[in-house]
Image (spheres, rainbow, N blue to C red):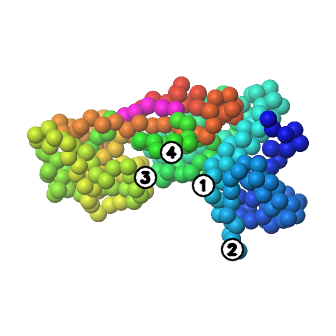
């Protein structure tokens, strides 16, 4: 049973401040405490928990694995407490600043067109939106929700699936007129395959060969881009062949700006899209819960 004289929330706040400030002295200044008091408080926590949380050195403060896990939990607890107070004060109505990070194609073609409806429905919420295809750390970036494409690997995050889409290989008619149309996956060796300038979960494009066996075609070409929307625009301009989610290029295919290639050798893999966040259930801030429910209701891929 916990001792009633221990202010656990206060201890957690001090620990989180220490980690974020990078030193006991900097945290002490922010909290209007003495460095000695901060150091003793952390030492008492470590003694009570039976685990070392930080490794102290002359130059910097490093988290132990236990300290890193405790920090993540502490940030979440403090956020939940703040949200609970805000919700109670506002009658649990969704309000406050919502920080959203989205991969670029989804942000431009799905999220931003829907945001006016969301803000009209929840006028007490304000939204910060960042678009990037680079995977961010929600805790570091202080994001409430991240929209991600592809397989998920971070077990500490909770995810809600928004949909999934077949993946298609495409090129512009002008590119095909100049370089020919590949008839098998082996023909791609003679073509410009555009890629991304950041790590992906696969090193190449999956296909079936003429015998129906799975093969991976490496990505080799003279164009690397930062996001899927840039790749789509490069493909439409005739720069090379791209592999993108079908929902992303469907309007271009319908308009004749892009042509699907090697459909009979497509292995049928699909790209899922998830909204990922920290925390779950009743502990979610009302603004985050409202946003997630809105996405599930409105997004179509």
Q: Nearer the viewer, residue 67 or 256?
A: 67
Q: Secondary structure at mark 2?
A: loop
Q: Secondary structure at mark 4?
A: loop
Q: Position of residue 298 (x, y in %)?
A: 52, 27
**Of marks 3 and 2, which one's residue comes earlier in the chain?**
2
Q: Which residue is mark 2?
A: 59
Q: Which residue is mark 1?
A: 65
Q: Residues within 10 Å of mark 2 (few under 14, many from 20)?
A: few
Q: CA distance from mark 2 to mark 1?
A: 19 Å
Q: Could you tell me if the residues under marks 2 and 1 are in contact, i.e. CB atoms within 8 Å?
A: no
Q: Nearer the viewer, residue 262 or 58?
A: 58
Q: Secondary structure at mark 1?
A: helix
Seen at 75% across and 59% down, the residue is 18
Q: CA distance from mark 4 to mark 2?
A: 30 Å
Is 193 left, or right, of 61 in this rendering? left
Please identify, in this view, whether the residue under mark 4 or under mark 1 is nearer the observer: 1
**Residue stretch in magenta:** 160-165
Please identify, in this view, whether the residue under mark 4 or under mark 2 is nearer the observer: 2
Q: CA distance from mark 3 to mark 2?
A: 38 Å
**Of marks 4 and 1, which one's residue comes earlier in the chain?**
1
**Of marks 4 and 3, which one's residue comes earlier in the chain?**
4
Q: Which residue is mark 3?
A: 227
């Amino acid at each position: 049973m916990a001792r009633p004289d221990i202010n656990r929330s206060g201890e957690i706040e001090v620990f989180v401040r220490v980690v974020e400030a990078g030193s006991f002295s900097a945290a002490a200044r922010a909290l209007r405490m003495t460095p000695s008091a901060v150091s003793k408080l952390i030492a008492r926590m470590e003694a009570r928990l039976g685990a070392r949380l930080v490794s102290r050195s002359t130059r910097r403060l490093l988290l132990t694995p236990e300290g890193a896990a405790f920090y993540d939990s502490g940030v979440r607890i403090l956020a939940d407490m703040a949200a609970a107070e805000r919700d109670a004060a506002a009658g649990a109505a969704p309000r406050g600043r919502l920080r959203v990070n989205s991969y670029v194609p989804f942000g431009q073609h799905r999220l931003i067109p829907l945001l006016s409806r969301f803000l009209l429905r929840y006028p007490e919420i304000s939204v910060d939106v960042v678009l990037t295809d680079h995977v961010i750390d929600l805790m570091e970036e202080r994001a409430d929700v991240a929209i991600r494409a592809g397989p998920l690997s971070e077990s500490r995050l909770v995810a809600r699936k928004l949909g999934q889409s077949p993946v298609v290989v495409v090129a512009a008619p002008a590119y095909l007129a100049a370089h020919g149309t590949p008839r098998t996956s082996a023909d791609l060796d003679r073509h410009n395959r555009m890629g991304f300038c950041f790590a992906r979960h696969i090193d190449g494009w999956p296909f079936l060969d003429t015998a129906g066996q799975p093969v991976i075609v490496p990505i080799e070409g003279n164009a690397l881009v930062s996001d899927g929307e840039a790749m789509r625009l490069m493909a439409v301009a005739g720069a090379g062949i791209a592999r993108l989610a079908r929902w992303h290029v469907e309007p271009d295919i319908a308009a004749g700006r892009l042509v699907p290639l090697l459909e009979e050798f497509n292995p049928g893999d699909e790209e899922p899209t998830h909204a990922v966040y920290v925390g779950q259930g009743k502990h979610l801030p009302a603004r985050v819960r409202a946003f997630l429910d809105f996405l599930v209701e409105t997004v179509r891929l």
